Structures are given as C-alpha cells and as structure tokens.
Image (tube, rainbow, N blue to C red):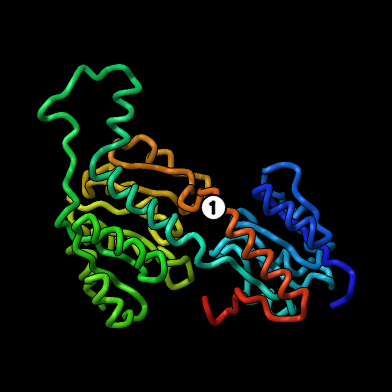
Amino acid sequence: MPATRLSVVVTRRLPEAVETRMTELFDVELRDTDAPMTRDELASALRRADVLVPTITDAIDAGLLAQAGDRLKLIANYGAGVDHIDVGTARSRGILVSNTPGVLTEDTADMAMALVLAVTRRIPEGLALMQSGDWHGWSPLSLLGGRIGGKRLGILGMGRIGQAVARRARAFGMQVHYHNRRRVRPEVEAELEATYWESLDQMVSRMDVISVNCPHTPSTFHLMNARRLKLMKPTAVIVNTSRGEVIDENALTRMLRAGELAGAGLDVYERGAEINPRLRELPNVVLLPHMGSATREGRIEMGEKVIINIKTFADGHRPPDQVVPGML
C-alpha cells in the first residue's frame, strides 16, 4: 500500500468516538447527515474511495460495483450482516469485504428475550392502557398473558446469537430446542441443555415460541414460509431479531389477523423500513425499529472492528473479519 493515508468514505453518521478515531488514522470523509446515501451518492463514493464503510441501509449490488473506481479495494461494512453487499461480484473485481461479527451477540440476545416477554406478557398493551389514562385499577382477568417458564423455545439458527438466546431462555426456565445447518458440538448442547431437531418442520410444529436467529442467505429466504408457519401451534408466538427476509411477512400477517398464531415480536422486516401497515393494527404484535444492536457499547465496538479491519488492510494484511462468498 502507498505511504499516503487511505481515503475512506463513511455512508452514515457513526458514534463520535468512532468518527474521531477514523479521522486520526485515515483521510476520512464523514457524513454530515444521518440520512442514507442515494444510489448516485453511493456510486460516487465507490469511484473516489480506497475504502467504503457502508451499513445495512446501503444496497451495494453488481450494478453499483460495476461503477467502482480502480482505487476501491475494501468495503469495510459497519455491521455483521452482509446480505446487502454482492460479495461475489466484489471479490471478482478484486475488492475485499469485511464485517463486524460477534460484538452484538449479547445485545441482540437481550432484545430477543425482551420480545418474547413483551409478546407473551402483553407489555405494550399494558403500557398503552397506562398512557391512555383508562386504567382504573387491578383486575383478576385484565391483560392475562402466558407464563414462559416450562415452555418450549425453538431457536432457528444456533450460532453465537442463538446460543446466547438459549442461555437466557434457560435462566427463565424454558426448554431449549434448536434447528441449525449443522448440529453444534455435544459439549455446547450439554451446557445449554438443548435438543437438536434435524427436521425444521417437526420442531416448528411442537414449539411454544420460535426465535429466528439465522442470517439471511439465498437458502434462508422465506425459510418460515406460509406452509411452515401453518405448522405452528395457534397458541405459539414467533420473534425475529435477525433478518426480516427469513419470514414470509404477508403470510405471517394473514395468520395473525386470522387468529392462527398467538402473537409475534419483530425487530426486522422483509422490506426494510416499509412495514406492512396491517401489522401495525394488531394488538398481539410488538414492532420495534431494528434496535436489537442499539446499545452505545455495541455501536462503538462495531466501529472499533471496522477500524481494525481497515488498519490491518492498510498494513498489507488480510482484514481479520474478511468475508468470502463461501462463508455465506
């Protein structure tokens, strides 16, 4: 690499501590507004940068990558998921891609359990009642929810986050079950007291709660499709803190409206910020604005990982969190 500092373009506002450190290390172009870049702005950034630091809101497809300049050598994603980046095309053009895995595990697992409790104990309905001023005191039959102790939790995706959810669920007295591409090591199963299901269909049909914790890949798109959602018990609930595309949102909405599922807790959506308006009307659905990773500590740690990836690359080495197509 040349002795001059790398030109780095950041597509969104990042925590101040992260931006300050980037400014010290690189010739960095920061974003003045927190609005996502337009496609034209992204194309311009790809032409003038050595390193692009995008987020999940930036769709970097083959068409955009075709407009990249010769100097672009690294896309250092701010976030763990890279389904918004065409990693294969980037690789074919000699552009490395890195991400920030691991730092959001505990935060996201906390949010998954928060959604389980919020849906099963009807917390948003209670909050709305209090804020409306219509609460007139305790009643034996008011806002009855369900106990989670002793219930079966089915975890879809037993990676770092899935295992962290399992630890929390055990502390609440839930029975842990899981489906994964590959069975986890016996010692992990023993620690989590987790039961493996090779058949996702069979697991789904027997669970009280489903937690979606797998990434979005071509093989997981609509993994929870209409047919599989119909296998769930009508008393069951589903929560998703992973990627919205894993669930067929229209089918889920129809079933919730028809009373064929007891409830859902969603932090992510199939079409990003375009949320099915019918979901907003349902009292048995808890909707959050993609805040599973929204802790100050987590967002700063994400930035630190981005900086390490760029700095390692600048020093002539492979970024420690490089993503290759075979990983996806």
**What amino acid type should be assigned to the residue bearing mark 1?**
Glu
> Which residue is pictured at 74% across the width and 78% down the height?
93
- Picture quadrant where residue 152 is located: bottom left
Left or right: 24, with 119 as reference point? right
> Image height check: is 273 above or below 171?
above
> Is 57 or 148 nearer to us in this picture?
148
> Is 327 or 310 nearer to us in this picture?
310
> Image height check: is 56 above or below 85?
above
Total marks shown come to 1
- Picture quadrant where residue 165 is located: bottom left
> Which residue is pictured at 80% across the width and 62% down the height?
26
User: What x and y, as percent, mark residue 224?
Assistant: 34, 62
Left or right: 164, with 298 as reference point? left
> Which residue is pictured at 19% across the width and 57% down the height?
173
For the residue labelled by badge 1, is the local secondary structure a helix, a strand or a loop? Answer: helix
> Which residue is pictured at 60% across the width and 74% down the height?
321
User: What x and y, as percent, mark residue 209?
Assistant: 24, 56
User: What x and y, as percent, mark residue 36?
Assistant: 67, 48
> Image height check: is 16 above or below 243?
above
Looking at the rendered image, the quarter that the N terminus falls into is bottom right
The residue where tag 1 is placed is 297
